[in-house]
Image (cartoon, helix red, strand yellow):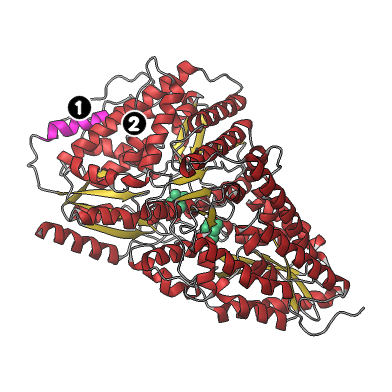
Amino acid sequence: MESKSSKQNIKTLGLLKEIDGNYYKEAVHARRNNRLVGWVNALSPVEILYAMDIIPIYPENHAAIIQARKMCPEIAGVAEAEGYSTDLCSYALCDIGSAISAESPVPGGLPRPDFLMLCNSQCGTLTKWFEVNSRRFDAPLFLIDIPYWGGKKPDKNAKNYVVRQFDELILFLEVLTGKSFDWDKFKEVLDISARTCEIWDYIIGLGRVVPSPLTVFDQFVAMSPIVAQRGTVTALEFYRKLKAELDLRVEEKVAAVPGEKYRLYWDNLPTWCSMRPFSEFLSAKKACLNANTYTWGWTKLAADPQRPFESWAETHLSALSLFYLGGRVKRLLEMIEEYKLNGFIIHLNRSCKVLSLDAIRLRDEVENISGVPGIVIEADHGDQRLFSESQVFGRLEAYFEILESKKQLTE
Amino acid sequence: MKGRSWPALANPVFLDLSEVITITRDVVLEKFDTVLKDPYGGIERWKGSYKGSIGYFLPHVPEEMIHAAGFLPVALLARDPGGTSFGGSPFIPNICCSYMRSVIEMVVSQEFAKLAGVITPIVCDASRVLSDMWRNESSFKFYEVFRIPRKVKGIGVREYFRGELERMRSFLENYTGEPLRDEDLKRSIEIYNKNKETLKKLYRFQVEHPSLLTTREFFNIVKCAMVMPKEVHTMWTAELLAVLEEEQERIPATEFIRLVAVGKLWEPPEVLDIIYDNRAIIAGDNFCVGSAYIESSGGVDGGDPYAVLMDGLFKQMTMFSGYLSPRRDKGAGILKLIEKTSARGAVFFQLKFCELLAYDYPDLRAALEKRNIPALAVETDLSAVSSGRVKTQLEAFLEIIKGS
Ligand code: SF4
Ligand code: SF4
């Protein structure tokens, strides 16, 4: 069967409006339903909260919505007027600005936290940011501290430390809720979470197919349930449906970018404030972003139901070490082969130091070893004031000329 | 200035005693200056007394343990821009703080080539990322990351910290091939305690008698303590104190406005000069190359040396902004310091792209505002020539205080 020539949207993604809407509705009515609300970060072990019937709220997710609606300048501006520096992560600025001004694209805004929980394997910024929230809302903050081991094998001491913090977290939540932890329910949630992560891994892996049935932009759009509702039947069902549709697209050779000519990797967060222009620019070039590592993180977050805390400790101490220079280089080199990439775009994200400070090094090392051309573009994941779209596209134009001449040489 | 002569030295390697020098304030300061002018190139001047030098990124590294293993621990300090800008390394983006950019640039230009090894503590996202990049850029046989806990309280925190210190100890033992004994560790702790106590005395003296020692001179002496043998540094500091104490009778007291300073680094040094030139001094601070360092001393004797190291590092960590701190007492520390030092205002040294203080600053400022304590934030950048803007800001701020 020939590849389809006009763009066909992924219909299942249309379900997200309702799924996300219901999630926020439930959150807004949490108090009415006597449910506690915990503000957590993207890599938190949210399964624990679902097992305790606590509603998890993701300030990062909320900030991304603010940014996708292009409200960042206005809302981050409120935080800046209070003295928060523009150099901070724009997620944090949007969240803090929203807390101060009560401005939010979510009807009713975010419910106040009863507590905050945070796992710092993601970055150090979050600890400082969540501390601000903890003070503002006078709500306790539980930090799961993950010593950073990069690509090295963590020692037993570090592992014990992390495991003991999970034990302490359960005690903390038991005191807070006045309820004993329901281990049976926890196992059920873990089981659902594991199945969901498996499907998410499969979906991301479909980027290997030629032509790719989905883009990384589709993955960015599709990721909210795997982040916020991991461990729920809602998320599992959504990804099942998405998988079924994508399998069909593969069978019918439906290309996410019709006439797919270039296959590219994207590094770092998306530019939430400028997703459509990027996507349209690349589509016009017949370039498909079919690989990334950012959305990959959530394929790893399921825990072994037999030894959940140990397995989470291992994951956070080592599997997520993909996010260190050596691991990033290695994985990108593998992906060039696996995903048949023509090039790679490294987003040097002004907001996110932890994923950006080695951007130039990453490009240089991968380019030197593989000979595949890469480009570093300077932007921000959410603050359109901090970069110029036209400049970025100008640089990408020049990059596509390199890709084109390279392609002609090899064909 | 009345002269003094050198006391007898236990270890002749440290100083050339061939001539007896008349000690004046300037002579002692000159010795500190000589060390600071070329801290890493000149490191071999201490060679006979150590197995080598081990560098460490700021802050929070158990220096005493490195010392007990027979090495000279030296802080990796940003290059003094000396009034010029630096471009930083071509592969470190400008969104990285200038401290890290400066140090990495120094690595690339081989300025640390005489060090035997390096230890990197993970204190922020920049140090986390750069700990891996550093591994690639340097060719040290000895390179290790020190993984301090990022919280001070909680189940298992102290046990973990002890385990991490033990890991560091084994690492050093493997490197030297010799056991690192508790007695050696205790001895080193005592040497470091003594040094920090002497520095505290000097700080108190400087605050009382600012016309005898400038703020920049004092903080340079603290800086010096982090790159040279403590034994010698303590002796020089004690000498300086003795000379200054003799001087205090003769020099008339001058009124200086007292301030509290908050930040990781006090550089570029011109900022301190602007404050001092406007008849103001820093009477209390939480700088890594300042009070967060010298206040982290204490205990040992029959005590547990690991507990002493942990308490010292925890103290540093809570003074500095990078760690989980109890939610209700934001501002309590700075208010206490202001009261203790009779300071009339606070200056925040906001290093560009260092996020840690930047998250704390608005709440700290609010706590000060509530008590009507004037506060000013100045944005500092080690890679750029200190701008006239900082001078104007500081002068206006000090005028307000003077008028109040
Ligand atoms: S974008 Fe980067 S800095 Fe901001 S919260 Fe996420 S990981 Fe941390
Ligand atoms: S100055 Fe700030 S950002 Fe830079 S290394 Fe130190 S703590 Fe990290």
- From what the image shows, is residue B335 above or below residue A230? above
Amino acid carrying label 2: it is His
- Mark 2 vs 1, N-terminal side: 1
Which picture quadrant has residue B22? top left
Q: In this view, does B222 lie to the left or right of A53?
A: left
Q: Is residue B16 visible?
A: no
Is residue B246 magenta-colored?
A: yes
Identify the residue under disc 1. Answer: B4
> Residue A227 location in percent, x, y?
62, 58
Q: Position of residue B256 (x, y in %)?
A: 14, 49
Looking at the image, residue B121 sits to the left or right of residue A248; the answer is: left
Q: Quarter holding the N terminus of chain A?
A: bottom right
Q: What element does badge 2 sit on? A: helix
Q: State the residue at coordinates (40%, 63%).
A: A99
Query: Mark 2 near ligand 2 (CB under 8 Å)?
Result: no
Q: Which residue bears the numbered disc 2?
A: B233
* Residue B285, percent from left and from top: 28, 44
Tell me the chief SS of the magenta region: helix
Could you tell me which secondary element the residue under label 1 belongs to? loop
